[in-house]
Amino acid sequence: MAPHSRTAKARPAEQDIASAQRVLTLEAEGLKALADSLNGEFAGAVDILAHVKGRVIVTGMGKSGHIGRKIAATLASTGSPAFFVHPGEASHGDLGMVTQEDAILALSNSGETAELSDIIAYTRRFSIKLISITSRATSTLAEAADVSLVLPNAQEACPLGLAPTTSTTMTLALGDCLSVALLERRGFSASDFKEFHPGGSLGNQLMKVKDLMHTGDALPLVRLNTAMGETLLEMTAKHFGCVAVVDDTRKLLGIITDGDLRRNMTDDLICKKAENVMTVGAKTIGANALAVEALAIMNDKSITSLFVLNEDGTVDGVLHIHDCLRAGIA
């Protein structure tokens, strides 16, 4: 009978849970050992990658290759241009994708992966920086590398000791360490992160107020001496449920909301001026603030709009809560 067609034996759920807990415990112990083992070699690897003028080329075979693809993706999304090259394809033309301004990050648990030989030789021939991640300090890969990151001796979570489990977890985590260290060195910000993640919920949460706010003729603006009749028309026409009371330079002096109208609902309301009804000291926000921050303010203050101000206090735009909700920010 073929291995993939074998029927799994039934056993109590407790045994499955115990098996999972053993895996997690062993892998956690591996990560702890990895953290304790970091030394100057790690800092040297970060230094090489931080000064790369080209790209970081990640390579590896089998399970190391799968881990390498994820590491390359994490590097690229956090400000370090990177991509994965399969070592087999590298030997058949893809070495042409590697330049002398690049650096190679090669993964191999044993450090003796035959398929890596051509790419290792290529880096030595053209003086391309080579960083290795392996479990054997005396392996061919480790000894050829400019910097070798050696994984600590840790038990594989596979009970047979054959399937890469703890070792791949440590390799993946080490890739994350390199990515985050580079991110911090470069001062990579949330705004930078958004540039590489414009789609999906993550991109939505990192949208700025300026990406959503209304400007120009859409702004509901009146002057101090504007009659309330005209002010009401401006509020109705612009559909924000409020107007900003500004001076001739468009500096914010106060706002009038539906609540202000209710509080001043008298027979002579229509005869009053905007300055007699406005509220001073309204909550505002800057254009470069995150839209999720603006939404939090509106929810906290139970308001539906926020005026956006420049540093000099002049009105730059207005943001409505519906703008945030339409953008998928919640």
Image (tube, rainbow, N blue to C red):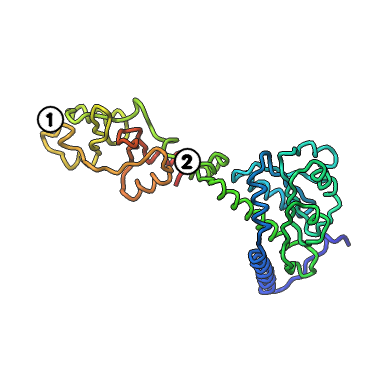
Asked whether the beta carbons under mark 2 and mark 1 sit within 8 Å of each other, the answer is: no
Q: Is residue 233 above or below residue 20?
A: above
Going 75% across and 37% down the picture, which residue do you hit?
A: 99
In the image, residue 54 lies at what x, y percent? 68, 39
Q: What amino acid type should be assigned to the residue bearing mark 1?
A: Cys
Mark number displayed over residue 271: 1
| Residue 322 in the figure: left or right of residue 165 | left
Q: Locate residue 56: give its quadrant.
A: top right
Which residue in the protein does label 2 denote? 207
Mark 2, other Cα within 10 Å: few <14 / some 14–19 / many ≥20: many
In the image, residue 199 lies at what x, y percent? 56, 40
* Figure label count: 2
Q: What amino acid type should be assigned to the residue bearing mark 2?
A: Met
* Distance in Å between CA atoms under marks 2 and 1: 42 Å
Going 73% across and 51% down the picture, which residue do you hit?
A: 131
**Mark before the other along the chain sequence, 2 or 1:** 2
